[in-house]
């Protein structure tokens, strides 16, 4: 074999190996790129999942915080309402306690007696006045007994006075039915209305 033919065979062998090497490198490069892409896609999916999980947890925490804040705000509002309604009731009782027991006050006692007598609905009534209103209640009973409204109804003033700032407690003679129309009882029955009024003011 001539030297030129020998070089051709060698060159061909080198070229073949070079091509195989390029193909191998190309395959390895493609595989590496594919692995990188798969890794990036997996990482993206994992990141998306983490973001979704974080968002869900954050929303849960937010809802929990808002719920707790709402509960605390409601509790605080109820506390303020109780405090304010108690203050209003104390103020009202102080004003009532200082009212002069004059003819105007006697008319108030008459109205309380009429209301309580209607609530009891008996022909024989026993009236227990508040301690400061014994004399006023006695006069009011005397006057009402002479009116058409109380015709056929007897009212007896009890020797037992009620520990109250004012008003009366009226009972049937047998004691089965009783109606507390003292100012404390009336204010207590009006407490929810007082709260509603205060709440309306607080919301302005």
Image: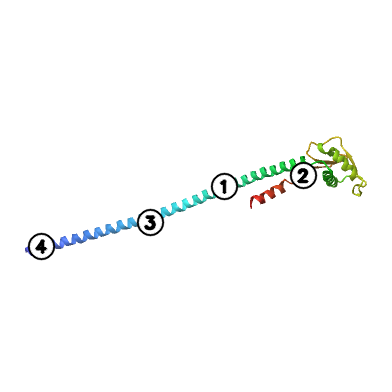
Q: Residue at x 89, y 39 (%)?
A: 156
Q: Quadrant of residue 4?
A: bottom left
Viewer can see residue 123: no
Mark 4 or mark 2, which has the lower sequence index? Answer: 4
How far apart are labels 1 and 3 at the CA level?
Answer: 41 Å
SS at badge 1:
helix
Residue 47 percent across, percent down from the top left: 41, 53
| Residue located beneath label 3 in the image | 41
Mark pair 4, 2: CA separation: 125 Å
Dot label at residue 69: 1
Taking the image as shown, residue 202 lies to the left or right of residue 124, namely left
Observer-nearest of 106 and 87: 106
The residue that disc 4 covers is 7
N-terminal label among 3 and 4: 4
User: Do residues under tags 4 and 1 come within 8 Å of each other at their CB atoms?
Assistant: no
Q: CA distance from mark 2 to mark 3?
A: 75 Å
Disc on the earlier residue, 4 or 1: 4
Q: Who is closer to the viewer here, 191 or 64?
A: 191
Instruction: Report if the CB atoms under discs 2 and 3 are less than 8 Å apart.
Output: no
| Tag 1–tag 3 contact (CB < 8 Å) | no
- N-terminal label among 1 and 2: 1
Mark 1–mark 2 Cα distance, whole angstroms, equals 35 Å
Percent x, y for residue 114? 85, 46
């Amino acid at each position: 074999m001539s030297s030129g033919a020998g070089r051709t065979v060698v060159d061909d062998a080198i070229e073949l190996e070079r091509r195989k090497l390029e193909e191998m490198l190309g395959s390895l490069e493609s595989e590496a790129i594919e692995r990188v892409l798969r890794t990036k896609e997996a990482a993206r999916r994992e990141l998306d999942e983490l973001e979704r999980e974080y968002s869900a947890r954050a929303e849960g925490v937010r809802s929990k915080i808002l719920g707790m804040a709402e509960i605390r705000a409601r509790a605080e509002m109820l506390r303020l309402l109780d405090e304010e309604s108690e203050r209003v009731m104390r103020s009202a009782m102080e004003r009532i306690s200082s009212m002069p027991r004059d003819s105007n006050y006697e008319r108030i006692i008459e109205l309380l007696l009429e209301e309580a007598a209607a609530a009891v609905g008996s022909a024989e009534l026993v009236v227990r006045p508040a301690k400061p209103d014994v004399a006023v209640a006695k006069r009011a009973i005397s006057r009402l007994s002479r009116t058409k409204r109380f015709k056929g109804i007897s009212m007896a003033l009890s020797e037992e006075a009620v520990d109250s700032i004012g008003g009366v407690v009226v009972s049937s003679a047998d004691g089965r039915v009783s109606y507390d129309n003292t100012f404390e009882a009336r204010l207590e029955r009006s407490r929810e209305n007082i709260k509603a009024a205060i709440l309306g003011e607080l919301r302005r």
